[in-house]
Amino acid sequence: MSNNLLIYNTLSRKKEPFEPINPPHVGLYVCGPTVYGHTHLGHARPAITFDIVFRYLRHLGYKVRYVRNITDVGHLENDADEGEDKISKKARLEQLEPMEIVQQYVSLYRHHMARLNVLMPGIEPLASGHIIEQQQMIKAIIDKGYAYEKNGSVYFNVLKYNQDHHYGVLSGRKIEDLQSNTRALEGQDEKANPLDFALWKKASPEHIMRWPSEWSDGFPGWHLECSAMSTKYLGETFDIHGGGMDLLFPHHECEIAQSMAANGKSQAKYWMHNNMITINGQKMGRSLNNFINLDQFFDGTHKLLEKAYSPMTIRFFMLQAHYTSTLDFSNDALQAAEKGFDRLMKAGETLLTLKPSDQSSVDVKALHEKCYEAMNDNFNTPIVISHLFDAVRTINSIADGNETINAKELELLQSTFNTFVYDVLGLQANEQAAKPSNDLSAQLIDMLLNLRMDAKHKKDFATADAIRDQLTQLGVEIRDKKDGFEWEIK
Ligand code: ZN
């Protein structure tokens, strides 16, 4: 299978022709969310970026095995292997089991991704479901001499690894600089060198998420899950590894080192990183009070927002920037995106009503080729969108009678528009605001909620909760009232 696709490879720092290892199969691994809080823009950008990669590779005819993990254990509060596990902490604060936190936020994440029209990956593995694979990888790394045990914890020996391989191959960081910039933190004297990172941590007595191992009752280091799960599902070397730029160092650098140490092979051929998001020119952060979650965008309920923005406005806005550029969110920019998106969708409707003429005054073939050229140039979605707006102008001027199009050209215009707008960019008309009273699904939702009320009256709370949870997962927001309920499709 041939293609003209160029991918910017973070590893080589240049655009390279895309040559899969075992065509037509392509292995794609993307670092997914750590599920301890609401879905926000920082989750949406990598998900949308790699959704485009997934969609386009499939469009080109590849059989893509797409793995996007869920981190539910081992991600500590800081990168120096210290602090509380993020999920344990949330569980402690909310007095829930860690797995209840995981379940709640995985459901929410999937719900939001569906609203953004992000396709589900083929495999969505949880780190806690792969403890044995992670332990096996630790053993392999110890056997090869690149890790050591200390007081029940196991650490990766970065200096030893760097003697035989290159630690810093992805980030371009030099070991000497890293050493002079990394100071030993208090309580880290277990490490032979401050650069070393944990593969296994012995759990302190109050630590909830723990598993038995030959070293101690403990838990895996955060970086390890991606090396172990990518090897399990995609093999020792696979095609594309992706994630946000914030994961490049140390997470991805450590993944490369672990996989090379255990398997003796490069983990991935191409590394892709999406750039970061800012809000009104500022970095996004909980402490900066600009941490807007996706529900707040969709409802317009955050004080920084002038109005609600639909999931498709958010998606379209993100695609108007190249994934390698930073992207700044502001009300002005979002409202401009909303207008543009509406124009595009209206043109899609107009396109269905166009009638062919005998003569054609437009050149659709050029448009078709330019859209492919843009996608082939490292997934350049903003350029694709600019070509699609040329198509919008053409569609509108044919509709106004200023241009004509023959049947063959009209067919190509429709197929090009449909391919790029709906299949490749994954845009779709905004969800209909619910709820028309004679609509069957509205009646079914009312019926289920009445059954829930009955169950509650009979004190069958398990059934009542199951109905509520499943409707919530389907995007039905339920508000209990004194004398009944209200609902809305989100
Ligand atoms: Zn990862």
Image (cartoon, rainbow, N blue to C red):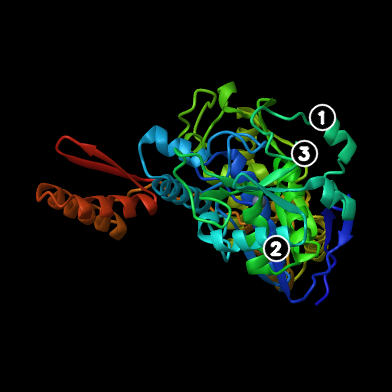
Residue ID for mark 1? 181
Q: Is mark 1 within 8 Å of ligand 1?
A: no
- Left or right relative to 370: residue 25: left
Dot placed on the residue nearer the N-terminal end, 2 or 3: 2
Q: Secondary structure under badge 1?
A: helix
Nearest-to-viewer mark from 1 and 2: 2
The crowd level at tag 3 (other Cα within 10 Å; few <14, some 14-19, many 20+) is some
Residue type, mark 2 in image: Ala
Q: Residue at x 78, y 63 (%)?
A: 368
Q: Residue at x 64, y 60 (%)?
A: 228
Nearest-to-viewer mark from 1 and 3: 3
Tally of marks: 3
Percent x, y of residue 431: 46, 50
Dot placed on the residue nearer the N-terminal end, 1 or 2: 2
Q: Quadrant of the N terminus?
A: bottom right
Q: Residue furthest front?
A: 151
Percent x, y of residue 215: 58, 53
The crowd level at tag 1 (other Cα within 10 Å; few <14, some 14-19, many 20+) is few
Percent x, y of residue 205: 46, 39
Q: Residue at x 15, y 52 (%)?
A: 460
Q: CA distance from mark 1 to mark 2?
A: 30 Å
Residue type, mark 1 in image: Asn
> Which one is in front, 399 or 100?
100
- Left or right relative to 176: residue 249: left
Dot placed on the residue nearer the N-terminal end, 1 or 3: 1
Residue ID for mark 3? 193
